[in-house]
């Protein structure tokens, strides 16, 4: 009985109802004609609705009575407790409801079958086989791959009961595969949405029935049983709903299912957002420009993206192992995750370990922003001799080498060895052993600082010489070794779990949304209607502004975000916080680096009052086809309208009153009649002489010689560009 009461609730209820109803029917206490499915009796004025459910609770006679109950309990409980598909409360109930509905319509209405218990069991077996591919299963005394188990059961039915019974049972496989398609295959590989969602009321009902912890490869797949609850204790309705453990689990579930979105509001929000994720954390402390906007049902919270988008917009805080180079590690990550492109935010030498931020696909647009961010290291330094002052002398020397320092890259580094200035922000001595000539210190520095060179300078300052023994990076930009650091094996195991078990929870654990790297930026919240325009490169104007951070300065880098917490772009602020609070028009920010894909949100530009007025003027011929002023343009439009899509100098030229054609013709004739100055004539003569010299130098060239000359010119230009880009990379590259 302990085994039964500790079973998950849905499977326990199904098995109990099947046992009771089958016992009553085969014991002669209940007539079978009252429980079988009859469409004519169900769909009538006074429907016998219980037949929709009772037709699933009748086993076969004699030995089938035991076998059907055994298979239902075994595979139902295995799915409800251990399947990665049903990790949230109520998901298995939704699965059973969907499968039962499809079986009823297919087997009952189309095939005129009356009992569906076997079809439901074979649906359980099929889903179990999909989740456990590669394992062996026992069918009576035969061991066979679990993928063949549902087909073996179907063949057994065909042999014993005929084709009609087998065809009816096959509807269970059809129903289970339809659930798999709509809930996993289509959203993951087809780019669609998941249409089979567990309702909130069902989640609340089953919130006290948590699946137990499943340990696979590493980490924990599902929510562990709290310490206050005995693992052997039942989770049924006999437990007190007000127990401490269940209350904590309910609170955790409510947080997970909470809709993290900024909603339109007329007053000040009283919601505490200190525990909201990523860019939405403490959004209630942002300054409000307006609370009115029209939400658009596009996009989603970064944590709720479908798996393909989640990976393509993800970053990994990788613990780089010793010996492989940073580029090798990134190439391995690209191959493991099957990504189109990957990048890292700052090179580490092969022997150096620690934080290496790996950006995937869309997140590679943030590589430059993280390469220039600050870094922190823990270094082991080896002195070449004892120092007379001991630890105190070493500490003073370490404090001396703080601030802006001259550095030349060491010989081991694969960059140009030119003198550069790098800043050491702070350093601390952790441990020092004068007898062993070893010291351990922590340093916070600018990107591109060479800790190996710093160790050499420390040795020179102490007068005994020194070199770097070991180095580990403990922080890189927004990531440190305490914020989800993972190893290469973790990533490999997570991908294996998804490929073989269809379990995406591990991939979501090792990969973080790209918004994680932008939590240190000051935020500007954009209306949903302005998102796609910004993705196409438009400047953010005051009408598209919702909220903004305090303390924004002009020309400061900020992050533009949606009301759902998605990062749109990194932008340069064109107004300070004070101006954003008081101005009614103007440019808020210019896009520096766009992150979000285009057309994720619908196009909403060209619908404002100014844009509509501009369209009317163009259709009336008062503006040309490019929207520029002409002779028929009203003076009010010329004075009031400013085109923010062109530079200020060009806009000033466009704002000048256009010259009539008659005046242009007269001016042209006057210029033709007026004699040119000697200086202008001299400049014209010099340019003509240069062109004549070039033509004379290349006279008599054959087509092959001309092609060779152009090829060399092109190679020279490309070589110059490569040298320039290499120099920029060396300046921004980060090593030890």
Image: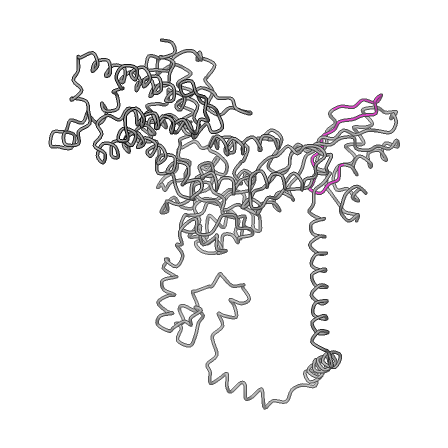
Is residue 446 within the magenta segment? yes
Relative to 102, is 657 on the left or the right?
right
Q: Residue furthest bottom?
A: 673
x and y percentages locating residue 335 in the rendered image: 59, 40
Q: Nearer the viewer, residue 508 or 345?
A: 508
Looking at the rendering, in which quadrant would you find the N terminus? top left
Q: Residue furthest top?
A: 1
Q: Position of residue 692 (x, y in %)?
A: 72, 82
Residue 73 counted in the magenta span: no
Eyeballing the image, is 672 above or below 558? below
- Scheme of colours in the image: one colour
Residue 549, position as x, y percentages in the image: 50, 42
Residue sitting at the far front: 159
- The span picked out in magenta is 431-451
Give me the residue at 85% from left, 31% from top: 462
- Above or below, 618 against 723 in this view is below
Q: Is residue 32 above or below residue 282?
A: above
Q: Is residue 234 left or right of residue 163?
A: right
Q: Nearer the viewer, residue 522 or 20?
A: 20
**Residue plotted at (72% across, 70% down):** 708
Image quarter of residue 337: top right
55 vs 245, left or right, is: left
Count of number-bearing discs: 0
- In this orientation, which residue lies closer to the viewer: 536 or 522? 536
Percent position of residue 90, x then y? 35, 26
Q: Quadrant of the C terminus?
A: top right
Relative depth, front residue between 432 and 640: 432
């Amino acid at each position: 009985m302990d085994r039964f009461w500790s079973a998950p609730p849905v499977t326990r209820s199904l098995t109990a109802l099947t046992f009771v109803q089958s016992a009553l029917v085969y014991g002669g206490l209940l007539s079978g004609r009252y429980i079988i499915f009859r469409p004519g009796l169900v769909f009538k004025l006074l429907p016998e609705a219980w037949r929709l459910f009772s037709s699933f609770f009748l086993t076969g006679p004699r030995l089938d009575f035991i076998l059907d109950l055994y298979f239902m309990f075994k595979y139902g409980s295995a799915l409800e407790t251990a399947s990665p598909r049903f990790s949230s409360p109520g998901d298995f109930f939704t699965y059973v409801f969907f499968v039962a509905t499809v079986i009823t319509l297919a087997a009952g209405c189309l095939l005129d079958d009356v009992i569906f218990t076997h079809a439901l069991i074979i649906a359980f077996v099929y889903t179990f086989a999909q989740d456990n591919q590669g394992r062996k299963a026992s069918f009576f005394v035969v061991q066979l791959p679990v993928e063949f188990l549902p087909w073996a059961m179907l063949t057994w039915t065909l042999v014993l009961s005929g084709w009609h019974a087998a065809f009816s049972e096959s509807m269970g496989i059809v129903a289970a595969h339809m659930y798999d398609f709509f809930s996993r295959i289509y959203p993951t590989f087809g780019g669609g949405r998941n249409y089979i969602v567990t309702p909130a009321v069902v989640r609340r009902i089953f919130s006290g029935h948590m699946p137990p912890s499943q340990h696979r490869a590493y980490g924990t797949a599902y929510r562990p049983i709290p310490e206050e609850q005995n693992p052997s204790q039942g989770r049924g309705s006999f437990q007190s709903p007000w127990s401490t453990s269940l209350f904590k689990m309910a609170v955790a579930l409510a947080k997970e299912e909470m809709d993290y979105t900024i909603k339109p509001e007329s007053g000040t929000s009283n919601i505490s957002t200190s525990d909201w994720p990523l860019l939405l954390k403490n959004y209630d402390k942002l300054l409000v420009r307006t609370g009115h906007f029209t939400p658009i049902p596009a996009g989603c919270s970064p944590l709720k993206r479908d798996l393909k988008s989640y990976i393509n917009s993800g970053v990994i805080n990788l613990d780089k192992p010793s010996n492989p180079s940073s580029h090798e590690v990134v190439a391995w990550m690209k191959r493991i995750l099957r990504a189109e492109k990957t990048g890292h935010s700052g090179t580490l030498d092969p022997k150096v370990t620690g934080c290496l931020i790996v950006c995937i696909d869309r997140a590679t647009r943030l590589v430059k922003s993280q390469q220039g961010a600050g870094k922190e290291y823990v270094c082991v330094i080896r002195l070449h001799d004892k120092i007379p002052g001991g630890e105190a002398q070493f500490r003073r020397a370490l404090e001396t080498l703080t601030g802006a320092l001259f550095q030349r890259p060491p010989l081991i580094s694969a960059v140009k060895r030119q003198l550069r200035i790098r800043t050491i922000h702070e350093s601390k001595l952790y441990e020092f052993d004068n007898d062993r000539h070893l010291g351990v210190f922590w340093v916070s520095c600018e990107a591109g600082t060479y800790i190996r060179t710093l160790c050499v300078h420390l040795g020179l300052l102490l007068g005994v010489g020194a070199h770097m023994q070991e180095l580990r990076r403990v922080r890189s930009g927004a990531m440190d070794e305490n914020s989800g650091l993972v190893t290469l094996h973790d990533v490999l195991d997570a991908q294996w779990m998804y490929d073989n078990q269809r379990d995406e929870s591990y991939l979501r654990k090792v990969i973080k949304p790209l918004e994680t790297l932008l939590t240190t930026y000051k935020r500007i919240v954009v209306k949903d209607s302005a998102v796609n325009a910004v993705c196409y490169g438009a400047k953010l104007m005051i009408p598209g502004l919702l909220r903004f951070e305090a303390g924004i300065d002009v020309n400061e880098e900020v992050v533009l975000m949606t009301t759902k917490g998605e990062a749109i772009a990194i932008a340069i602020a064109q107004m300070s916080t004070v101006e954003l609070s008081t101005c009614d028009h103007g440019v808020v920010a210019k896009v520096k680096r766009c992150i979000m894909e285009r057309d994720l949100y619908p196009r909403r530009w060209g619908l404002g009052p100014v844009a509509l007025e501009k369209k009317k003027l163009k259709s009336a011929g008062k503006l040309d086809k490019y929207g520029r002023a002409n002779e028929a343009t009203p003076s009010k439009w010329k004075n009031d309208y400013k085109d923010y899509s062109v530079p200020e100098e060009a806009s000033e030229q466009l704002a000048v009153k256009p010259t009539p054609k008659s005046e242009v013709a007269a001016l042209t004739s006057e210029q033709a009649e007026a004699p040119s100055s000697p200086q202008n004539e001299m400049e014209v003569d010099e340019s003509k002489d240069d062109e004549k010299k070039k033509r004379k130098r290349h006279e008599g060239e054959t087509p092959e010689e001309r092609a060779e000359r152009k090829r060399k010119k092109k190679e020279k230009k490309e070589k110059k560009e490569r040298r320039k880009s290499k120099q920029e990379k060396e300046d921004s590259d980060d090593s030890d």
